[in-house]
Amino acid sequence: MPKRFFFDLSTTLRHCPPHVRRYYPINKTHFLQRMSHPSLNNRSFSSSFSDKTGFVGWYLRKLESHPVITKSITSSLIYIAADFTSQMITLPSSASYDFKRTSRMAVYGLLFLGPSQHLWFNFLSKILPKRDVNTTLKKIFMGQAVFGPISNTVFFSYNGALQGDSGPQIIARLKRDLLPTLLGGAMFWPVCDFVTFRFIPVHLQVC
């Protein structure tokens, strides 16, 4: 943001009632220095919440102290919730709930997706550290061209193997399902990735 904006804001706040000024920074130099460094803002944002009590503060502290384990568990819980919802919507009334399927999803999120996304997001932030629109689009393209095909290949292979499929059956499944899945995901994930890469600090990009 332009410095003129913060100068006007500071001047305006000086004429506000005391109960308003108390909640806003008045020192223009200090305020501008903090707002001009995105990395400082990210740390400030995170620490301001991690200092709080309650679930959000506890979770952010876990992300700082044990990022891989925390993201892995989070990914596993998301997969459990997603599979549970999927089965509740699509399951015929005469069929029973498939706990083995949910267990497979939970393990996949815990052992593969959580750790791999942590490494992937951090890798992208190192080779493409900026968060402007062009850099964000590059990250989205790399996700669709590299990480998406790999993660979906692992998912179909892992799921097929645990269901008892042989090697040729797994290959046939990949030929049948991989490309349609990637094309379907290309209609949805780039929008989510844009918001994630553009606005969310890397340590909060869980999945």
Image (spheres, rainbow, N blue to C red):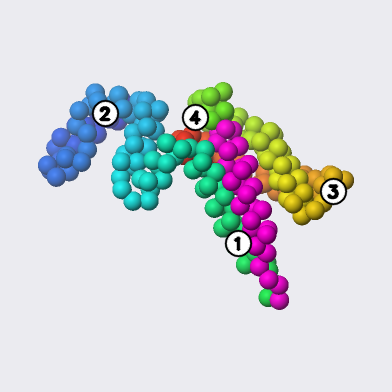
Q: Nearer the viewer, residue 160 or 132?
A: 160
In this rendering, would 138 be left or right of 197?
right
Please tell me whether mark 4 or mark 1 is closer to you in this view. Answer: 1
| Foreground of the two, 111 or 125 | 111
For disc 4, the neighbor class at 10 Å (few under 14, some 14 to 19, many from 20) is some
Residue 134 shows in this picture: no
Q: Nearer the viewer, residue 34 or 133?
A: 34
Q: Earlier in the sequence, mark 3 or mark 1?
A: 1
* Dot 2: element: helix
Residue 22 image-quadrant placement: top left
Residue under label 3, please give it: 166
Mark 3: which amino acid?
A: Ser
Q: Residue at x 59, y 46 (%)?
A: 110
Q: Earlier in the sequence, mark 2 or mark 1?
A: 2
Residue 202, image x, y percentages: 48, 34
In the rendered structure, find residue 84 and report the number of the disc placed on it. Answer: 1
* Residue 100 forms part of the magenta stretch: yes
Pick whichever of labels 4 and 3 is earlier in the sequence.
Answer: 4
Question: The N terminus is located in which quarter?
Answer: top left
The numbered disc on residue 31 is 2
Looking at the rendering, the stretch of residues picked out in magenta corresponds to: 94-121
Cβ–Cβ under 8 Å for marks 3 and 1: no
Of pointers 4 and 1, the one earlier in the residue sequence: 1
Q: Which residue is mark 4?
A: 131
**CB-based contact (under 8 Å), mark 4 and mark 3:** no
At a point 61% along the width and 52% down the height, the residue shown is: 106
- Mark 4–mark 3 Cα distance, whole angstroms, equals 44 Å
Q: Secondary structure at mark 3?
A: loop
